[in-house]
Amino acid sequence: MKATAIAHPNIALVKYWGKRDEKLILPHQSSLSVTLGPLAVTTTVEFTGQKGPDQIEINGKVAEGGERKRVEEALKLVRLEAGAKKKLGAARMVSRGDFPASAGLASSAAAFAALSVAARSAAGFGRDTKAESILARRGSGSASRSIEGGFVRWNRGKRADGKDSFAEQLFDERHWPELRLLVGMVSREEKEVKSRDGMRSTVETSPYYPAWAKDAEREVKEIVRFIKRRDLEAVGEIAERNAWRMHATALGANPPLCYLKPATLEVIEACRQLRKQGVGVWFTLDAGPNPVLLTSATDEARAVALVKAHGASEVVQCRPGGDARLV
Ligand code: DP6
């Protein structure tokens, strides 16, 4: 009743922003991401068969508060699925990420994906990417997209119970090995409004929200065609436009949500200038100030130099990563 799993984070090229069901974590629109290697989170889950509270350790510390609650919820769902007869009992979970929280990438996506694979396996279930994606989604929406590697689409789904809202791989990580994703750290400050709260406020108060949701659904379809052809220019243009539109709908919230810093805009402007010189580099932005650049292996060095020249203290260099897996 013990298993260990590894999962990678992901970066969305068409973002998930807004829930239609807060409890089940069901999105208003589909989204699409690239799984990022080599960064990874490793999680071990053991069901002890004993009564008592779950023991939860994340990055060397006992988990508390909201973080603890979210993990407990996920473990509870596994016990429920396994049924009372199995007597899984309390769990011991230890999770560790090999990238600093300061990398600017939400480690929660990789963490809930690894937890989902490890916990289901510890409970005796065979691998089932759909069930794992649905369980990971209940921890954090974007985690549903970290079960599989390469290019992954989280389908919105229509059902009220969420059984058709899970992510699936469209192309594996070998489809586009020369793609590079560079996280430029222009700020290490903790953001004031977390994604969860920011997206809720946007759904409730931004007059632009319905337009965002409709447009993003269409952009998912559009970008898939270009990923298939490995057309970096077309993929980069859609990713940039989609990031701007997500930030535009958030800016339209009340109170307005601005996740950008002056340095973010500097990097974006520098990207544009570099493109004029024939360097293939585009950006995307999550709900934070750190841009993620999309480029190719050929232009990687110039793109790294660009972000460093504009105040990035560090650049985390990634490429398409693989599936979450048991070890
Ligand atoms: C801007 O998945 O962290 O990174 O479902 O509330 O846990 P919850 O939110 P989360 O939100 C991610 C938002 C985003 C875009 C994306 O990854 O698609």
Image: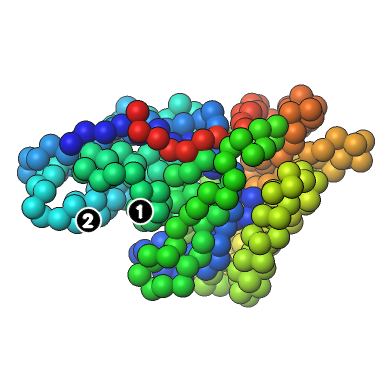
Residue 158, position in %: x, y?
A: 46, 72
Which amino acid, by three-letter code, is at mark 2? Glu
Q: Can residue 110 be seen by looking at this rendering?
A: yes
Task: Say which of 110 and 268 sits in front.
Answer: 110
Task: Tell me the residue at 53%/46% (across/down).
Answer: 191
Task: Say which of 285 and 278 sits in front.
Answer: 278
Rendered-image quadrant of the N terminus: top left
The reply to whether discs 2 and 1 touch (Cβ–Cβ < 8 Å) is yes
- 261 horizontally vs 92: left or right: right
Residue 73, position in %: x, y?
A: 27, 53
Task: Tell me the residue at 13%/44% (across/down).
Answer: 88
Which amino acid, by three-letter code, is at mark 1? Ala
For disc 2, the neighbor class at 10 Å (few under 14, some 14 to 19, many from 20) is few
| Residue pointed to by mark 1 | 131
Residue 304, position in %: x, y?
A: 73, 27
Say above or below: 245 vs 140: below
- Res 81 label: 2
Query: Which residue occupies the extreme right position in the image?
Result: 277
> Which of the marked residues, 2 or 1, is nearer the chain's N terminus?
2
Alpha-carbon span between mark 2 and mark 1: 10 Å
- 179 horizontally vs 165: left or right: right
For disc 1, the neighbor class at 10 Å (few under 14, some 14 to 19, many from 20) is some
- 130 horizontally vs 292: left or right: left
Task: Tell me the residue at 69%/49% (across/down).
Answer: 228
- 230 horizontally vs 132: left or right: right
Q: Can residue 249 be seen by looking at this rendering?
A: no
Quarter of the image for residue 278 reads: top right
